[in-house]
Image (tube, grey):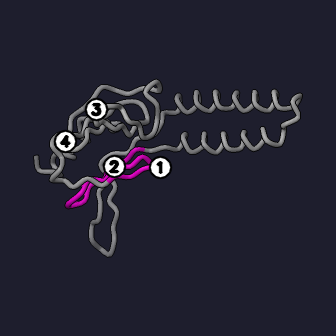
Amino acid sequence: MKCTILGGAKASRLISEAGISRGSQKVIASVMGLACVFVIVTAIPSGVLLVSAGLVAVIALLTVSVLHITVTVEATEQNLTVRCRPFYSKTIPLEDILDASPAPSSSMIGGFGVRYLGQRTWGLLVGGPAIVLETPSRTWLISTPDPESTAASILAHARK
């Protein structure tokens, strides 16, 4: 567990950090690389190479951003912060946590990043094992490498 120290006092404790697996990264990079090659090859005969090169640059930047997504769960004395870096962060008061439990694993089919899954459920996903975190207003599906330990740690912080 990693602790962040601010001014000599313990500010937050890292409970969990998950990233996209190497295998998934290779698949995503390969598919996007092929898409970029296709865009360039089809642009050459049509005379829009400059515009296509710009499109390829945007695709490449977005792909690099997606490949570096990490989902973290951090706790302070009063809050739980869930993040899907570099895109999203949400602070949840510990008193709002109703339950945390292991969930079925997510896959590439479910997507990566911040996902709306329906019925007031949001996902912070990178594939693999996950937990379900319940609050009065929303249910979260959060990727984590160790669901049992993460759920237990969250409940211990929330004193439930």
Q: Amino acid at mark 3?
A: Gln
What distance separates the C-alpha of mark 3 from that of mark 4?
Answer: 25 Å
Question: Which residues are the magenta region?
Answer: 71-90
Would you name the residue on which mark 2 appears?
82
Work out whether residue 28 or residue 13 is closer to the camera in this orientation and state it.
28
Q: Amino acid at mark 1?
A: Phe
Sequence-earlier tag: 4 or 1: 1
Chief SS of the magenta region:
strand
Q: Secondary structure at mark 3?
A: loop
Tell me if mark 3 has few (under 14), some (14-19) or many (20+) residues whose alpha carbon lies within 10 angstroms of its own: few
What distance separates the C-alpha of mark 2 from that of mark 3?
Answer: 19 Å
Would you name the residue on which mark 1 appears?
87
Sequence-earlier tag: 3 or 4: 3
Tell me if mark 1 has few (under 14), some (14-19) or many (20+) residues whose alpha carbon lies within 10 angstroms of its own: few
Sequence-earlier tag: 1 or 3: 1
Residue 147 percent coordinates (x, y): 28, 35
Q: Amino acid at mark 2?
A: Val
Residue at 15% in and 53% down: 95
Q: Are marks 1 and 2 in contact (CB under 8 Å)?
A: no
